[in-house]
């Protein structure tokens, strides 16, 4: 009987030692599974900047997060065997939309081991707006101040939605509860070409309310001043329905159809000062364009778990020891 106890104790001790080794391997991976890099880079619009990353292993993911107002015109990775994943989290569900207008995300995957890799980005000028596609996909080019106190943007649709439209939005995040004296005013210029519409959009946590200020018949060179208050009638015929709702953002939405684009090519839209009044709070959004600014990206290297040979040996040993203990205990029980 004493021999049985000693053998069982030895096996249990071996199980404990192997389990500890296995746990330490897992703990090391968990502790080092994510590397976070937060550089501060002084950039000028149009120049290529580089972000160097440490050793990358096969199947590691690289996750780049930038401020929503930063416009990445081009992004490349060297060596070339690191591929950008088709990551599009441009959802407009009301419960997650506030998060998505605050930042933009890009993800890559390595297909082999590298001692180091480099992210290369070309940025457009910084604006006070978050520029996002709502329908389809447009390429845009910020032209700085091409008109008096106007931020001008050239738009070039590259993919239309199923309804043959594409819409891009210039979004200014603004979180407050809408009060009765709520008012939006500003100036927009159709500098060149034509668009199907330009809407001012009040985005709340529950709903969006759109007000058309430019239509397909507006000729180039037209300057439009707009004033929208809590009782203006939106495109759905609603008036005053957003009173008391939680405001998320004010947006300027520009829509272009494939028919109009084929006829007039790339339009240029000028955005002037945007003024928002709500309760005792008033904000003026100047259409300033920054060609030089500090870029503060966040880069995450997400390690893929790849068991080492010692870890696999520990798992096999642990399995053998547990089975051995079970068989030994069963044998002792039968002998008793």
Image (cartoon, grey):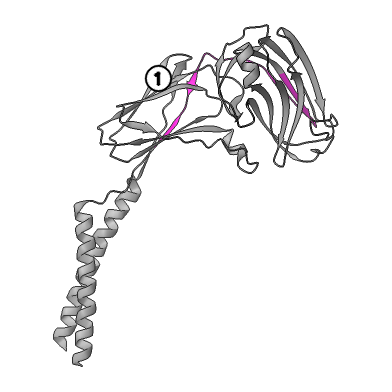
Q: Say whether residue 267 is visible.
A: no
Q: Which residue is mark 1?
A: 49
Q: Is residue 224 visible?
A: yes
Which element carries disc 1, helix, strand or loop?
A: strand
Instruction: Say whether residue 298 is magenta.
Output: yes
- The front one of 58 and 50 is 58
Residue 53 horizontal/vertical position (percent):
33, 31
Give the camera-side residue of 36 and 162. 162
The C terminus appears in which quarter of the rendering? Answer: bottom left
- Residue name at image x 83 percent, y 35 percent: 238
20 or 228: nearer the viewer: 228
For residue 9, what is the image quadrant? bottom left
What residue lies at 79% left-to-right and 41% top-to-bottom?
244
Assess disc 1: are there few (<14), some (14-19) or many (≥20) residues with their C-alpha within 10 Å of its C-alpha: some
Residue 15: percent from the left, percent from the top? 23, 69
Q: Nearer the viewer, residue 261 or 142?
A: 261
The residue at the far bottom in this view is 336
Quarter of the image containing the N terminus?
A: bottom left
In this picture, is 309 found above or below 115?
below
Magenta run includes residue 141:
no
Q: Quadrant of residue 264?
A: top right
Q: Decide: is 115 above or below 191.
A: below
Residue at 47% from the left image edge and 36% from the top image edge:
87
Q: Position of residue 332 (x, y in %)?
A: 20, 87
Please identify the dominant SS of the magenta region. strand
Q: Which residues are magenta?
A: 274-300
Q: Is residue 270 above or below residue 235?
A: above
In the image, taking residue 106 as reference, residue 112 lies left or right, namely: left
Name the residue: 69% across, 12% down.
190
């Amino acid at each position: 009987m004493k021999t049985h106890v000693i053998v069982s104790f030895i096996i249990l001790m071996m199980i404990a030692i192997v389990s500890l080794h296995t746990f330490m391997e897992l703990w090391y991976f968990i502790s080092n599974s994510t590397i976070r890099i937060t550089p501060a880079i002084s950039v000028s619009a149009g120049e290529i900047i580089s972000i160097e990353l440490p050793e990358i292993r096969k199947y590691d993911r690289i996750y780049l997060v930038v401020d929503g107002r930063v416009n990445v015109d081009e992004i490349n990775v060297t060596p070339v065997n690191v591929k950008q994943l088709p990551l599009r989290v441009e959802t407009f569900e009301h419960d997650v939309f506030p998060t998505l207008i605050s930042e933009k995300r890009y993800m890559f995957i390595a297909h082999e081991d590298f001692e180091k890799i480099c992210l290369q980005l070309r940025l457009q000028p910084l604006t006070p707006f978050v520029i996002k596609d709502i329908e389809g996909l447009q390429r845009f080019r910020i032209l700085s101040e091409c008109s008096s106190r106007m931020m001008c943007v050239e738009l070039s649709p590259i993919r239309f939605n199923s309804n043959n439209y594409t819409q891009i939005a210039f979004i200014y995040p603004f979180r407050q509860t809408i009060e009765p004296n709520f008012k939006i005013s500003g100036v927009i210029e159709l500098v060149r070409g034509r668009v199907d519409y330009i809407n001012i959009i009040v985005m709340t946590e529950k709903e969006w309310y759109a007000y058309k200020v430019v239509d397909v018949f507006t000729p180039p060179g037209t300057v439009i001043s707009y004033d929208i208050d809590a009782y203006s009638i939106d495109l759905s015929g609603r008036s005053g329905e957003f009173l008391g709702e939680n405001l998320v953002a004010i947006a300027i939405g520009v829509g272009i159809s494939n028919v109009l684009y084929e006829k007039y090519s790339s339009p240029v839209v000028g955005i002037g000062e945007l003024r928002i009044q709500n309760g005792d709070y008033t904000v003026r959004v100047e259409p300033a364009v920054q060609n030089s600014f500090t870029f503060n990206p966040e880069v995450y290297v997400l390690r893929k778990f790849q068991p080492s040979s010692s870890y696999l040996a520990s798992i096999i040993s642990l399995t053998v020891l547990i089975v051995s203990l079970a068989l030994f205990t069963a044998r002792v029980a039968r002998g008793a």
